[in-house]
Amino acid sequence: MKKIIIWGGKGNGTVVLNTIIDINNLSATKQYEVIGFVNNKHKETVSIEGIPVLGDIDIINELVDKHDAYFLNAISSVNTMNIVKNTIDKILINESNRLINIIHPSAIIGNNVKLGNGCFIGHQSYIGQNAIIEDNCFIHAQCYVARDSIIKKHTYLAPKAYVGAEAIIENSVYIGVGALIKERVHINEFSIIGMGSIIVEDIPEKSKYYGEKAKKR
């Protein structure tokens, strides 16, 4: 049984926790034990859903070694993308084999999909054949990632996001709830796609697009 530490709190942290509970409940033997959270608000929060908060993210390497544990990031918001990238990149240097993938049992993963380290794929999500999901990507519930698409490092897909075939999503992109990305569109790094937006053309880096007929803001 693998021990897991989650970086996060209430919200995506508990989404990951409950996914692990679902995996254990559907397995003949318990596969995972969540031994704690790391959270920079740990001085205010002692436990989350009955699981102890072990300290700041700064000590994650120490905690992983001490407990012989694995690690998954659940911090994903428009305000934290750069922090997450810098933190996970440091961890990847020495602890890449300790970043674990967690996939909800109801998710569908197509043939020849390539997953990096530290990826989360949520309830009823679909990843099409030949897609590439790089390190530390968080794909929430009921997302659709079509065939031959590429999702690069540190990218977050909120619930019900849709990525069309052969689209390329660069590093540290945030795609909001219910956003639709047309096939073969290229979204450059550190861009934010707002909730419900429809993207039909390439997006330059560090851009913010919102609306049904998405416009730059």
Image: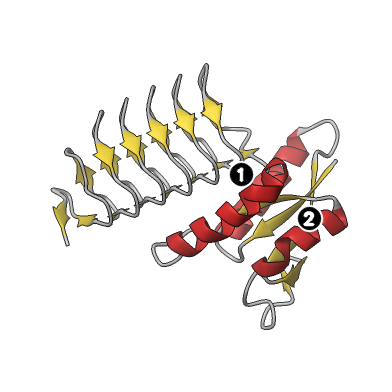
Could you tell me which residue is drawn at 44 percent across and 61 percent down? 82
- Mark 1: few/some/many CA within 10 Å (<14, 14-19, 20+): many
- Tell me the quadrant of the picture where the N terminus can be found: top right
Could you tell me which residue is drawn at 38 percent across and 23 percent down? 148
> What residue does disc 2 label?
64
The reply, left or right, for residue 35 in relation to residue 94 is right
Which amino acid, mark 1? Gly
- Of helix, strand and loop, which one carries label 2? helix
In the image, farthest residue toward the top: 111
The reply, left or right, for residue 162 in relation to residue 45 is left
- Of helix, strand and loop, which one carries label 1? loop
> What residue does disc 1 label?
118
- Mark 2: few/some/many CA within 10 Å (<14, 14-19, 20+): some
Question: Up-down: is 70 above or below 6?
Answer: above
Residue contact at pointers 1 and 2, CB within 8 angstroms: no
Which amino acid, mark 2? Val
- The answer to which quarter of the image holds residue 39 is bottom right
Using the numbered discs, state the Cα–Cα distance from disc 1 to disc 2 in whole angstroms.
Answer: 14 Å
Q: Position of residue 191 (x, y in %)?
A: 30, 53
Q: Position of residue 135 (x, y in %)?
A: 54, 42
Whether residue 18 is visible to the viewer of this picture, yes or no, is no
Whether residue 162 is visible to the viewer of this picture, yes or no, is yes
Q: Position of residue 63 (x, y in %)?
A: 79, 61
* Mark 1 vs 2, N-terminal side: 2
Could you tell me which residue is drawn at 57 percent across and 60 percent down? 87
